[in-house]
Amino acid sequence: MNDSEQAALIPDEGEVGIVEHQDFVSAERFRFESGGSIPELRQRYETYGRLNAAKDNAILICHALTGDHHCAGVYSLEERKQGWWNFMVGPGKPINTSKYFVICSNALGGCQGSSGPGSINPETGKPYNLDFPKLTVRDMVRAQSLLLDSLGIERLHAVVGGSMGGMQTMQWVIDYPERVGRYIALACGARHTAQAIAFNDTGRQAIITDPGWQQGNYSTDAAPDQGLAVARMMAHITYLSDVGMQSKFGRKRRASAKEHFDVEFEVESYLRYQGKSFVTRFDANSYLYLTKALDRFDLHSPESLDATLSPVTAPGLVVGFTSDWLYPPQGNRELVEALLRLGKDASYAELEMDYGHDSFLVRAPKLYKLIRNFLER
């Protein structure tokens, strides 16, 4: 690439430019919290910025349920799709890659290059499918810790994540307090509500009852796409808010439908598009495993929330959003209240935004300021 082409990808607001993913492979058997194991651990990840000589400027970003390792930048001049948090990560941006070395990996159990149900078991030469072990958020975090070991990073400047990424962030400061300098957890909580579990199970049932699921033993060209699309549509509704959907769609109609149940309203068209596009990039079994891992996540267990959070030593910032009804603000506040009871250094911010659970994925100057200031304080 010549200088002018690279410059086109790095405008004034601070782009990381063209990026490439990398793969960490550990030939040592990886053991899960459940007692199961896989013969090889693979994690796909991307990095942005440079690791300094002291190796103390690293920030780990943990993605949400349907996210992946592609957090910032683009893959080529032709493929200009930006990473999912591109507006947050880059030179001069809130997570400033001129100062920090940023790492984002595809979570264990995912389907974008890390070990998951769709991965090939080297012992059999076939996909794991449902032979992949029972998965927890703690397993995801321990896999990330092995990735950091391979990079020679003993201690992180920060861990940052939203939703499932926020749960991973909290698990990091509980399991590896000596390795985390500070943390930011957005739109998460100590455990799922009954409503959140109910929505997840409805999505899982849509997949499992799809004739194409075949007890998890489907092929890539005959997958349970209809079930996965419905699961995505259901989940996507929970990521939005009533105010946001009303302002974006209201009761706007498309051209008259030819058939009785054709798409009639714009919101129907939007959700069906979300479902159809999702099946081109996500694996149904991964969706089952990851949503189950989130439902099992419970910092109140096995003793109490205070007991679980007692190992935390790093200062933390927890951010809730007023319109988030999937992970309501009170669930975020509960974490901070428990940390403060224990005498920990913890702060809570509640932002008034109309984008529901997805608010942390939306450009918002007030969120930029919170994250920038906390990382640099």
Image (tube, helix red, strand yellow):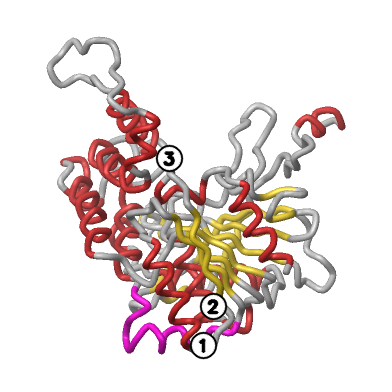
**Which of pointers 2 and 3 indicates the residue nearer the eye?**
2
Check if residue 16 falls in the magenta segment. no
Is 317 in front, or is 146?
Answer: 317
Q: Which mark is residue 173?
A: 2
What residue sits 49% from the left and 60% below the top?
A: 350
Which three-letter amino acid code belongs to the residue tagged 1? Pro
Quadrant containing the C terminus in the rendered view? bottom right
Say which label, 1 or 3, has the lower sequence index: 3
Residue in the foreground of this view, choosing between 166 and 56 = 166
Q: Residue furthest right?
A: 3
Q: Mark 3 and mark 2 in contact (Cβ < 8 Å)?
A: no
Q: Give the labeled residue for mark 3.
A: 281
Q: Amino acid at mark 3?
A: Arg
Residue at horizontal 53 percent and vertical 61 percent from the top: 161
Q: Are marks 2 and 1 in contact (CB under 8 Å)?
A: yes
Q: Considering only vertical position in the picture, is 329 above or below 215? A: below
- Which amino acid, mark 2? Val
* Image position, residue 78 (x, y; %): 65, 26
Mark 1 to mark 3 CA distance (whole Å): 38 Å
Front position in the image: 8 or 345 = 345
| Tag of residue 52 | none
Residue 172 spot, x, y in % from top left: 53, 74
Q: What's the magenta region?
A: 298-313
